[in-house]
Structures are given as C-alpha cells and as structure tokens.
Amino acid sequence: MTTECGRSFEELVAVMSRLRGKNGCPWDREQTMETLRTYIVEEAYELVDAISRGETTDIVEEAGDLLLQVVFLSRIAEDEGRFSMNDVVLGLTEKLVRRHPHVFADGEADTSDQVLRKWEEIKSVEKEKKRKDTSLLAGVPEGLPPLAKAARIQSKAAHVGFDWEKGNLGPLYDKVDEEIEEIRNAVESGSADRIEDEVGDLLFAAVNLSRHLDINPDSALGRSNRKFTDRFRIVEAMVRETGRPWSSFSLDMLDAFWKEAKKAPMAGN
C-alpha cells in the first residue's frame, strides 16, 4: 500500500513538473505563489463542503484538488530555487514525529487534551529557537475567516488552561446573555462603533459556547444557511404561484408562507 501510494505521488509530481516545463501548459507556467492563493482557499472550502455532504467520491476529488495546490506551490518554489516537494514532505514528517513524543519517544499523553497541550508547548519552544513570536496565538493565520479564527484563538488559549471549566455551561450561557444586554445598551447609546464591538463580542461568545458543546461553528452556521436557503426557495415558489409581486405581501403574509415552508421535509424543522 505504501509503495503503491509512493509511486502514485511520484507520478503526480512528475506530471506537475511536465506541466511547468518548457513545453508544458502556458497557464501552469504563468502561475506564481501569489496567484495560487485564491485557488488554495477555494479548494480547501470545496473539500470542507464535500465532507459536510458526506459524498465520498467528491471528498476524494476535492482532497486531490487541494493536494494539487501543495504540489503546484512546491514546483513553483523549486523553479525559483527556494525549496522542493521533498523539503515539504520531510519537514512535515519530522514535525509529526517531533510533536508526538508520546508515540515516537518516551513522552506520555493519555488524553486528547494532553496531546494538544504538549503540541503547543513543543511548538512554542521551536518558535523560541527560531526567534519567532512565541505567543500561542502567533500561529493563527491572519487570513482565516473571522468565525473560524475565533474558534482557533479560543482553542489555542484553552490548550494552556485559559478556558471555562469543561462541562459547566452556566457561565457560557451567562456570557451570551450579558453580551446581548450590552448590545441593547450600545444601541441606546447610538454609537455605531460601540454597537459593532458588542455584536462582535456576542459572536465571539457564541463561538465559545459552540466549542464547549463540541459543535463546529462554521458547520453550524453553514447548516443554518442551507436551511434558510431551502425554506426561502419554498417561499419564493409560493409567491410565484400567486402571480403577485413581493411588494403586495405584508410581513405577516410572508411569515405565514415561512411557517408552511418549515413543515417541508427537505427544510427540516
């Protein structure tokens, strides 16, 4: 299995080398690390979407597309004399071994929390040796979407114990209620900046609550987006069937359509 995978990977690297070669594809030859950034993000989201849908064939395809971006990026770097695909693979392998001493050395870790905490400790030491920013939060990518970034920030802080007690949701419910009240106060103040701050704090608190409930906030919001979209499409169909314009319907009438849409099996409850 390992040998078969190795041959397949070597063939992939060879294909990319040919595409970037002298008689290769004009488009592939024109790409740079900067131009690949958009594709890398898009492919990552498409893989996440495939996983959410549970479509095995699509997961395989999208995982391949994301892998392609890594191979593509490495080929560009090799053309520029910066690093190679081999450097990427060796670096990753060494990191995995180094950060799992409980598997490859004499370290101990009996729970996932212990593993994550040890991972962050080792990572911090590595950064200090490289004279990089040693903050636990330094590794959170600036380009992450805000919702995912909030979850990542909170998770990293939790790895060193800076978190609410696990299993005790009371303080988290209180925090959400507190932030809602602060939004009310901000609205009364009329300050747009303050309102924005407090809405942000509410979203941050909601992400924290979802993390303690072992719910991925991106997945949860994505599910709500799909549910709303399904129901709204049903409402649109109801409006079309009447032959009347949207402006002729009151909010109460549209809300009645919405309640009907909620009963549709495809939309959920």
Image: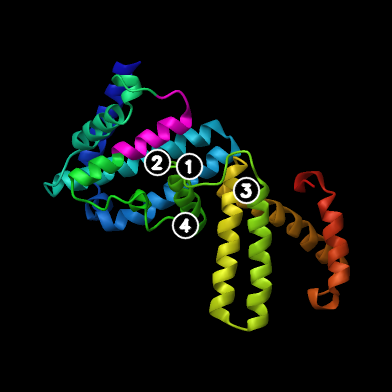
Q: Is residue 267 above or below residue 143?
A: above
Q: Give how far apart the Cα atoms at labels 3 and 2 are.
A: 25 Å
The image quadrant of residue 169 is top right
Residue 95 horizontal/vertical position (percent): 27, 33
Residue that label 3 marks: 220
The majority secondary structure of the magenta stretch comes to: helix
For marks 3 and 1 on the same chain, the one whose residue lies earlier in the sequence: 1
Amino acid on which disc 2 is placed: Asp
Location of the N terminus (image quadrant): top left
Residue drawn at (55%, 65%) of the image? 200
The image quadrant of residue 211 is top right
Q: Give how far apart the Cα atoms at labels 2 and 1 are.
A: 8 Å
Residue 79 visible, this orientation: yes
Residue that label 2 marks: 65
Q: Nearer the viewer, mark 2 or mark 1?
A: 1
Residue that label 4 marks: 145
Q: Nearer the viewer, mark 3 or mark 1?
A: 3
For marks 4 and 1 on the same chain, the one whose residue lies earlier in the sequence: 1
The question of residue 119 being in magenta is answered with: yes
CB-based contact (under 8 Å), mark 4 and mark 2:
no
